[in-house]
Amino acid sequence: MIDDGITINKVLREKVGSIEFRMLSPELIKKMGVVKVVTPELYDADGYPIDSSLMDLKMGVIDPGLRCRTCGGKVRECPGHFGYIELARPVFHIRYIPLIYVFLKSTCSDCGRILLPQVEIEKWLERLRNIKKIRGTISRLAIIKAIVNKTKLIKKCPHCGAKQEKIKLVKPSSFVEGNKKLTPVDVLERLKRVSDTDSELLGISPAAGRPEWMVLTLLPVPPVSVRPSITLESGERSEDDLTHKLSDIVRTNQRLYENLSAGAPEIIIEDLWDLLQYHVTTFFANNISQVPPARHRSGRPLKTLAERIKGKEGRFRRNLAGKRVNFSARTVISPDSQLDIDEVGVPEVIAKELTVPERVTEWNIKELKEYVKNGPDKYPSANYVITPDGKRKVISDETREVLLEELAPGYIVERHLKDGDIVLFNRQPSLHRMSIMAHKVRVLPHKTFRLNLCTVVPYNADFDGDEMNLHVPQTEEARAEAEFLLGVQNNIVTPRYGLPIIGCVQDQITGLYLLTKTEDLFSQKEVSQLLAQARVTQLPKKPASRKGGINYYNGKQIFSMILPEVDYREKSKTCPKHQHCKDPRCKYSMVVIEKGELKQGVIDVKAIGPEAPKGKLIQAIINKYGDKAAVEFIQKAALLGMAYLQKIGFTTLLTDTDLPEEAIKEIKEAFDFAQKKIDAYIKDYEEGKLEAYPGRTVRETLEFKIIESINRARNKTGRIVERHLKQDNYTLIMAQSGARGSLLNLSLMSASVGQLSLRGTRIRKGYRNRTLPHFRWGDVGPAAGGFVRHSYKGGLTPTEFFFNAITGRDTIMDTSMRTPKSGYLQRRLINALQDLKIAYDNTVRDASGRIVQFVYGGDGIDVSKSDNGRLLIPKEEVVK
Amino acid sequence: MILPQSVEEQLKELKETLKLNKAQMEKLRKIAERQYEKALIEPGEAVGVVAAQSIGEPGTQLTLRTKWLAGATEMTVTQGLPRLIEIFDARREPSTPAMTIFLKPSYATSEQRVEEIALKILEITLDDIIKEIDVDLLRMRVEIELDPQKMKKFGIKEKKVHEIIYEEFKTAKITTGAYKINVKPKDEDIDIRKLYKLKVKLRAIHIGGIKGIKQVLPVKHGNNWIIKTSGTNLKEILKLPEVDIENTTTNDIFEVFSVLGIEAARNTIIEETINVLKNQGIEVDVRHIMLVADVMTNDGTIKGIGRYGVSGAKASVLARASFEVPLKHLFNAAVSAEVDDLRSVVENVMINQPVPVGTGLVNLKVEKKEDKKK
């Protein structure tokens, strides 16, 4: 209980409207202080806190069992109370030194007025008071700086005519006027003389306080709960760094008192005074330049007030802008293709630990009683029961009988997580909003979180040991928000460019590609098998053919069964008919779906894959039938794709990278041709016959020509590879369907790695005039420049291998430097833009209500509701 | 209902491709209106965060290095992440200033004329037209030998060079001969160091062309020729009669600001950002980039994203303190008697209150029945 009888709980529930920042006055320090600290010792012989020491029980309690002598609260109840130290002599607050310096320089040493004529004072005062509130801080500081600069020019006080001596700041914290040192006492006197308006001009608003408060006469002592001591295993007490520092201050302060009253010599007093200044300085900040940091006995610098606040590990970024939470779990993830897309598999052990508070009503009391009866070790059960008056009771073998009796509507049961509960699922780094999505719980055996493969893309997860976090929303509001805003189905379309980011991946694509491409017919039995796996329980309406009393269906018909009734016309990634189809209007590369019936074309990444510019079919379904239908479709498509792939069998082979003799010969010819050409260029160059490109040197020109020849040869080999690969090449199928890999990867393995590039050029580093000792001096030919003629499968020569390693390392360096850089960029971007929101008048405004855009993006269209950034207009509706 | 311009354009496009008649057009418009209402962004949406994430998330995919664009036809331009950081930081000068100069139709088609123009704008210093420059220690002077060939290439007369040097070094004694110039400082105490300094100074003398244009390269652009430069001087380039003022650009945002104003600077930020992302094959909707550019240029000056720009200028003390250097902001707030109204996001996170965006923006008060009776 606080004095006025409001319980702490109630106080904390009030909404904070605003926070004012002011300076602390000595009066206030004294008023809020509950004890004057004078004793440097902390505990008596019994280990009991000494009165008027830094551990005085009036400042709050940290030991269980004791009660606070100010508010009577126990450990968790008492928020702690400030004490104060009466300083024997005033000292400077180190953080105010620059401002004190400004005041000393800009005010008269005699009369204390600001060094400006009256006219100027009025002029500046008006400007200062007319600053608008928004962006106020910056313009205020600018004006004050201008005022201070003006006063610098004045050497004689315009008010009393006194001549001004030059004042110097001797770092860290003393002032010298002429040859005389200004003690804090002198400074205090001078600051007291400065009038309120004058101090307003120099930067201290009268509302904030008085300039003399920058010199400390009283020092507030933070409550014990701010600096709790830890009891070590040995039973020894280890005090907080702040307590250490404070006891230094108290000790020095007491000695200074004693010496003052004993009338000790000036030198001793001054030494002690300086020491007090040092301790107070390091109490505030322990990393001030020219002040040796105060150290712990072990030599570790003490962590005092400033260090507690600052930096990534400081109060702001560690505890205020980000917080630790309960009802969360973390474990390794693994895939489960049978799970729904919006589900997450939760291990039973975790489900027993995480709970959902459920209010007992007459409709669920039977079920909840069952949970309580089960006791805490069984699943499903509950862990706690909360009575209507707010008491939390553990369910254990001893208490469960009693609780079972007691349970009635109005109670709350914290039951275990069960199937269908809404939870938030997250993988770091959380780079975009799809990094946290709401899933439905599915309690499963074993110890990993399970997720559907389609959701791997937005999380950017794989299963090589990745871990993910899970959070359980505890209120109805939170659950509703999670389900309807953060749900997987609400996040299919990314707001980055307005196309699906959730879709089929890898084998799922390959499967559907092959299924829709094949001309094979499937018997009714086979079709039933496939469709059942995709959770479809109907057969296509009309069989493609009928033979021997059995109905046969084709692949396109099977695929059509999972489609809702949509119309779709888009080109596929590659033309399924001709391998090297270059005709953009080739009709075979057109995918045509009419009324949910795949009439023509093949399904590949462009239709069902995630990430731009793919997933057009998913987009079409969302547009017509909404998110739910799209989730269902993706789910079925994934299952069907995999079912088909399992039926026919699919792998990747070493022989996928085999090339026929003929192709190998062609590749050799291409390279020999290039080599010959390059040799000719080099010869020309050496004989000085090579003509430079305009604006380039001859050497650069040679370089361009070599690169050009090499590139041409490489492109040629690419085409050769493409031409000679058989259509049943598994790796090629994966590349063509867009499931994984590319033709380039394939030709890297089978034909030639080609030119390696380091920092955008051929490899040039190494020895004098050559890249490796295996080459001649001045060798600029392909091999010496990092050209790898061989393929990964065929094997590289030692020099090729070495060059390959060089670029490999370079790539690793690049990635490891890039991640923190782009992370910082994103932090800055988010910090700068986080307050922008759409106001009710559809303008974009910042936190102060200033308009940033009159209409969002110029047209007010939400990217995640758009079709790749444009308004979605269903053409069919018009033409029809 | 009034549809935004972008939608109107889309409708026009559809009309042409689908060859719609009037009745169909009307139907299309109806559909578009319905769809537009559906696609409209909702009040409360935290568009800033979405924009920041949309640009920041693909950041890991950007390359770190400044890339040379291979081939004889391009020149060095900072690309990828460093360039993106440069743009958002609002650095005074880009690390690789460059211009793209478009020419008026009457000049743009002829390669020869374009090359002439290119040579005309290229900054020429003395260094570019000399055969040799030396310090003669015996006679204590700098000797210059001009290269007639180079001078002819750039179209510079010997007399003009003399005039410029006379003008620049009035205090020196200058003797000239056929393609030879000797410069001797007049003051008595000349030492070797001074001579060498003079030599450096002489080499950098501006002889012709436009200052700042370090390199020129005519490039084929569709049917026309354009000039790419390294180095930029928008103000002078725009004065040339041959230049197509509307399309010519520079990548120096501050230069655009000073020459063409804040709106143009905003567009430059957008264009440059789009360029960087497009070059790396990353798709980000323009709306996000527009929002960042608008925030940066909102108050009529260009502010960077970060401590010294947007984040440092926030009204809320706690918001500033939570980003970087918290102590500075707290002490400033104390002496200025600042009040934090807790209107932005972080402060409310700090004190465990709903944030004023999205669903947290909604204030719904339910009047209880018994209250009503009173």
Image: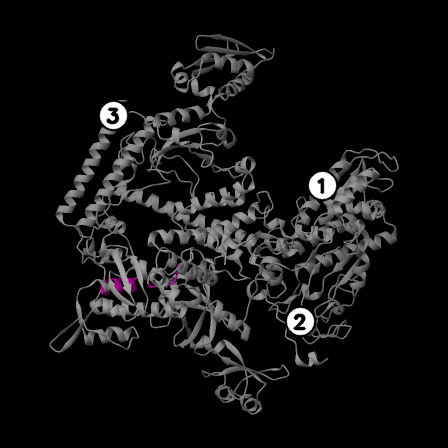
Region of the chain picked out in magenta, as a range: A499-515
Disc 1 and disc 3 in contact, CB within 8 angstroms: no
- Tag 2: Cα neighbours inside 10 Å, few (<14), some, or many (≥20)? few
Q: Quadrant location of the N terminus of chain A?
A: bottom right
> Of callouts 3 and 2, which one flags the residue occurring earlier in the amino acid sequence?
2
**Residue B82 seen in this snapshot:** no
The circle on residue A684 is: 3
Residue at image point 57% right, 45% down: B303
- Residues at marks 3 and 2 on the same chain: yes
Q: Quadrant location of the C terminus of chain A?
A: bottom left
Residue A71 in picture, x, y percent from top left: 75, 73
- Tag 1: Cα neighbours inside 10 Å, few (<14), some, or many (≥20)? some
Residue at image point 60% right, 12% down: B189
> Of callouts 2 and 1, which one flags the residue occurring earlier in the amino acid sequence?
2
Residue indicated by mark 1: A145
Q: Which residue is nearer to you in this view: A84 or B358? A: B358
Residue indicated by mark 2: A13
> Of callouts 1 and 3, which one flags the residue occurring earlier in the amino acid sequence?
1
Q: Amino acid at mark 3?
A: Asp
**Residue A348 seen in this snapshot:** yes
Relative to B335, A763 lies left or right: left
Instruction: Identify the subunit bearing mark 3.
Output: A
Q: Does the stretch in magenta take in A540? A: no
Q: Which residue is nearer to you in this view: A22 or A870? A: A870
